[in-house]
Amino acid sequence: MEHFRLFVLPFYAGAIFLLITLLFKYIYWFVGLSREQKRLFWRSLPTRATWKSILEIINESLLHRKIWRTNPLLGYMHTSFALGWFLLITVGWIETYVYFKGEGVPLYVDIFFSYYVHPIFERAFNFSLIKDALLLLILIGVGLALFKRIRSRVMGMKRTTKHMLGDRIALTALWLIFPARLLAESLTSAEVWRFGGYVWTLSENTQLIPPGIGCGSFLTGSLGQWLANFLPARIIEAQHIELGAWWIYSIALGVFFIALPFSRYMHIFTEMPLIFLRNAGLRASEKETTYDRFQIDACSRCGICIDPCQLQSGADIQGVQAVYFLRDRRYGRLTDAVADNCLMCGRCQQACPVGIEQNTLRLNSRAKRAYPDAPNRYAYIQGKDPSTGEGKVGYFAGCMTLLTPRILLAMEQIFAAAHETVWWADKNGGVCCGRPLKLAGEVDAARKMMNFNKELFQKHGITTLVTSCPICLKVFKEDYQLEGIEVLHHSEYIQRLLAEGRLHLHAGSETFTYHDPCELGRGGGIYDAPREVIAALGILKEPAETREHALCCGSSIANTAIDDEGQRRISGQVATALAATGATSIVTACPLCKKGIAREATIPVYDLAEIVARAI
Amino acid sequence: MTGRVIIIGGGVAGMQTAITLDELGFKPVLIEKEESLGGKLCRWDRLFPTMTPAHEVLDDLRNRLGSTSTEVHTATTVSGIEEEGRGVTLTDGRHLEAEAVVVASGFDIFPAERKEEYGYGLYDNVYTTVDVERMFREGGVRMANGQTPKTVAFLHCVGSRDEKVNQRHCSRVCCITGVKQAIEVKQQIPDAEIFSFYMDMRMFGPGYEELYRQAQQQYNIHFIRGRISEASPTIDHRIHIKAEDTLIGRPLRMSVDMLILAVGMQAGASNEAFSQNRHIELYPSGFLRPLNQFAGNVRSSSPRLFYAGTVTAPKNIGESINEGIAAAYQVARTLNSKRP
């Protein structure tokens, strides 16, 4: 107990509390995983996934490379805290090890090392210089964090997260830690400078430091020297100020550690198990699991998801963005108003530096409050077969294509021109693909639609299923498990017809701009097929935000809370962006997007099939 | 002091404004973008609720206008209105000077193609109420193949009270137009079955409600509360419709020979350009916003700019004509007070 000082207590208590809480949470969540999820995790150890995880932890938890891509200043801020602090702890630990020659000194000696030991400038190696440099790195980060509060735009963020009280306490403690440390170390240095001190040096004997030398390096040393000259000798000698500073440092650490598991700073540790679990193949599903907890607590509420959200930028709807959804869900105060008010366009997920599965989490939140599905619901669809025609290629128009019959007529012309014999699944009305119900959280009811359609597809022996609706496409691919049936979006099918020479089009010099439907692009990864088809017809002009960053049309069926005015405003946002390309018409590949954009567009909006049919 | 007053639009409101201004001793200048005067009324056969032939109203207005000294410019389009109503700019670049301007440019018919799910312009035998008036003028309702329809469905509120196409307002006159046309079809084809899909029937004028009752009791027209969700063609070129009868809460499907869309009134396309003038304001619907809806219906915030007719909101013919008179008197009041 030779090193014990009373001021280490707040830190010590905080650290032990933090450790117990983290272990409890992680073990509790891990135990709650399904057998299959656990099996996936154990099987991933040690494989390439493990190394991938370690690399990812370095890249994302320490270096925060994705945030650098959003904005360098923002990246610096996050990296300085994460990497800077991590290195500060690591260097402190090595330093302690070196000075105490591996003697088992208590943890707090590592943390408060400069209080105990006053290393002067050794010839061979200088820990103080490294520590001062790291401290400066972090202090600049703290300065940027303060600056972000005032002028977030400079840091690449128009809007920042509105934080809760717990977060504010933790934030204040975190910001205080590093200035407090600077002050404490400098005051210790001031005392040594004025009155001399002693140091455990690398040799056996304790060496005395005469007055006028001080300790620390360019930051703490220089500030110490200034303080020694500035402060009256009697105050320095009494050590009250020095001890007080160390107390503040320790309390700041303690408060931060105690607040951490209940605040957004839980992400610091939670991102690591999340990365391991994710690389083991775990994914969120349509029903809640404890894996979701790892994702939810890994959200740092950095707020990078707020700017891309068009509900916010286009319709002025606040407080429902991914960051707020995750926060509300984490603290058990999620309301339908928040859960339902989302286009599920995936723009936030695209921007999220932690890679949280926003859409699936939102979906399973909705599923949780869904009413139990009545057994006889949709009994009237049993045994129906509204399909017509015969062929190996099946075409599923979907509800939205039936409401935009120009697309259906265009597909008829395209199939006829390619001499394809087609089985028409729902030309005379059919059963919904199930995705709208699924997106509303009614996963069990949706399953009935899916089973009906799947049986129908299998009964008619099709080998290819073409749909012009990306909403249907997504559910066919992800939920139907259509073994032996290739599912194609009509853009892919048309592209294939062109490549095989089965369809010949008259190219023109018309200029088109293309709108990536969310469900097709971010949702299905299909970006090139429609572009290649357009390129065969005319000139394609890309809007400013395109492909993975494309805007949403605003008419998404996933949002059951937005009012018409909100949809219209978002439609105006995307229509303006598309018209700004100077193209003479807008092309998209989704019937819902077509309707959605047309509400506000000043130039004509076509589905891909329409411009293809026109050029046959 | 020239006494020249420009009237934009030669429909019923514009013609009446010119007639009254002439009576009051001013020099009206009537600008019409079409080849002839008359506006949308030229396309109508008979008028609700009295079944008066449209040409009777039109001929009367034209005759009275003809006996005035009105300077008429047809096939002329106005591109902008100068500040304080000092004149207008035409699309050919010319300027016409005046001491006041009356905007009577009317409305546009909602393009039914925008409601793609009803198949207008895509399938045979889907028509609008405007097409049906043309058919009446040309001798009667016929299907695309020339045959007489046996079942006809009317769909009300196409492009009215429909947020999905940004037309939130009620166009008012389409309800009674649909009722009138249903009766006319029945008069022409007594054994036809006629269905009328509506969400509300708004019978606001004298004799309208009576006509609606007559349609049900005397002509046996079936009114079904519920809008059609989609229409698709059948193999024999009939129209298959899906709807819901919301009074009994059941979905229904039927095939009809002809589907008639009761298209609404939307704001005139030129309103946007007119609103470049700082005294001309738009409602969110795109119609022009008058000074107030009570005693200032024909006035703008400028003492030399006036409105008449459907440029400010959907109206029937009588209301539009009255506004023409009201606007003329407001012009006179302003210009007379400026005289020495």
Image: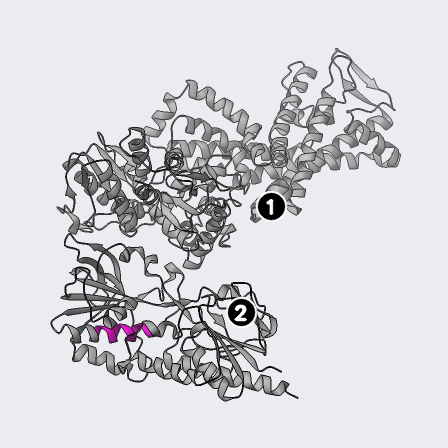
Residue that carries the numbered disc 2 in the rendered image: B281
Spatial CA span between label 1 and label 2 = 47 Å
Q: Chain of mark 1?
A: A
- Three-letter amino acid code at the position of disc 2: Glu
Instruction: Tell me which corner region of the image, top left, top right, bottom left or bottom right, holds residue A304.
Output: top right
Q: Is residue A244 left or right of residue B221?
A: right
Say if residue A165 shows up in the picture. Answer: yes
Instruction: Say whether mark 2 and mark 1 are on the same chain.
Output: no
Residue that carries the numbered disc 1 in the rendered image: A168
- Give the image location of residue A201, x and y in percent: 75, 15
In the rendered image, the residue lying farthest to the top is A204
- State the residue in front, A104 or B66: B66
- Give the image location of residue A564, x and y in percent: 41, 58
As helix, strand or loop, the secondary structure at mark 1 comes to helix
Instruction: Tell me which corner region of the image, top left, top right, bottom left or bottom right, holds residue A467.
Output: top left
- State the residue in front, A269 or A384: A384
- Give the image location of residue A316, x and y in percent: 51, 55
Can you say whether B266 is above or below A336 in the image?
A: below
The range drawn in magenta is B171-182
Say if residue B201 shows up in the picture. Answer: no
- Three-letter amino acid code at the position of disc 1: Arg
Which residue occupies 64% across, 45% down?
Answer: A149
**Tally of numbered discs:** 2
